[in-house]
Amino acid sequence: MSPRDVMTLLRPQQWVKNAFVVAPLLFSQRFFDPHELVRAAFAVLSFCGASSAAYVLNDILDRNRDREHPLKRGRPVAAGRISTSAAGGIGVAALVVAVSLGSPLGAGFQTVLAAFIGLQILYSAALKNVIILDSVTISVGFTLRAAAGVLAVGAEMSPWLLVCTFLLAEFLALGKRRHEAVLLGDYAHTHREVLGRYTVTLLDQLIAITAVATVVVYTLYAISPPVAEKLGTAYLYLTVPFVVFGVFRYLFLVYGREKGGSPTDILLRDLPLQLGIVGWILTVFWLLYR
């Protein structure tokens, strides 16, 4: 068991998903408050541990199916480089780290963290095999990340934040399902039964719906008078072009480049998408902290 295999098992590159935990701090306009920044950092690290524990559990349960997958067969547990017992120990350690880091953040945060962990267990054990509910579960997990960030820094729970997070996560999850369905073709059901129930046509329709919903809901949020009053700026609509570009760019990568298997890998490797995200972040900072 090499250190590289351990890191592959924990998937630290996927920790970028936990940036959703920081979003409430950014929009609460307390990003430069040292106390709140430390609490947000603890929240992010806590969810990194919980996420890694979930990935370990998933790899253990899916080890036999992963051996039949052209991309996943090289995972340490599926390839036999890490035993299931050793992987279980690593997963428990990651879970202990998650709970320990989250304990100072209050009962509310701990409750959401527990809900996230429970949801990941249910997903790995059963929900990932139920059509539609599999992607919805993933999206709820991202929404719980945002809610945990709200509770960690004592911000106001915004329904806009939660709905936008859910829709964006659903959009990305469906793109991933489409990539898997196309990649595996007629053998999709042999890797995971639920993939055989999806059709590319259905996924295309669902992706189109969630793409439109994501852009529309975010635009409504950006031009909402109560939001403008709360944030102290009426110019949040300036961030809408970045969101539109991000959604369109991801659609291009899914349909034009046949990508989408890992939204995280796309984010880490696609320069135009990275520039769009940086542009959005800088614009938000300029509007909220000038």
Image: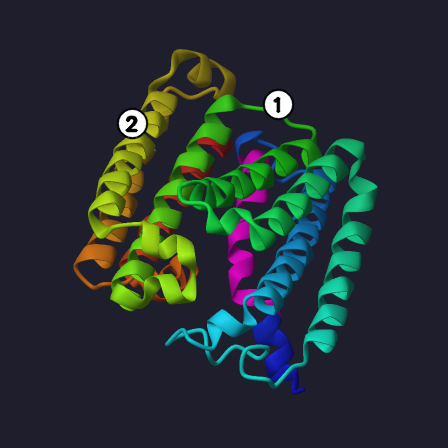
The tag on residue 251 is none
Please tell me which residue lies in front, 243 or 137: 137
Where does residue 138 sit, x and y in percent of width and height? 49, 45
Nearer to me, 270 or 162: 162
Element type where label 1 sits in the image: loop
Whichever of labels 1 and 2 marks the residue nearer the N terminus, that label is 1
Q: Is residue 194 left or right of residue 198?
A: right
Q: Residue furthest left?
A: 256
Residue 150 placement: quadrant: top right
The residue beneath circle 2 is 216
Q: Residue at x 68, y 75 (%)?
A: 84
Which corner quadrant of the image does residue 2 belong to?
bottom right
Which amino acid type corresponds to the residue marked 1 in the rendered image?
Answer: Glu
- Inspect this view and state whether residue 176 appears: no
Q: Which residues are magenta?
A: 10-26
Q: Is residue 234 left or right of residue 16?
A: left
Residue drawn where x is 46% and y is 36% of the image:
165
Q: Amino acid at mark 2?
A: Val
Which residue is located at x 57 percent, y 80 percent? 76
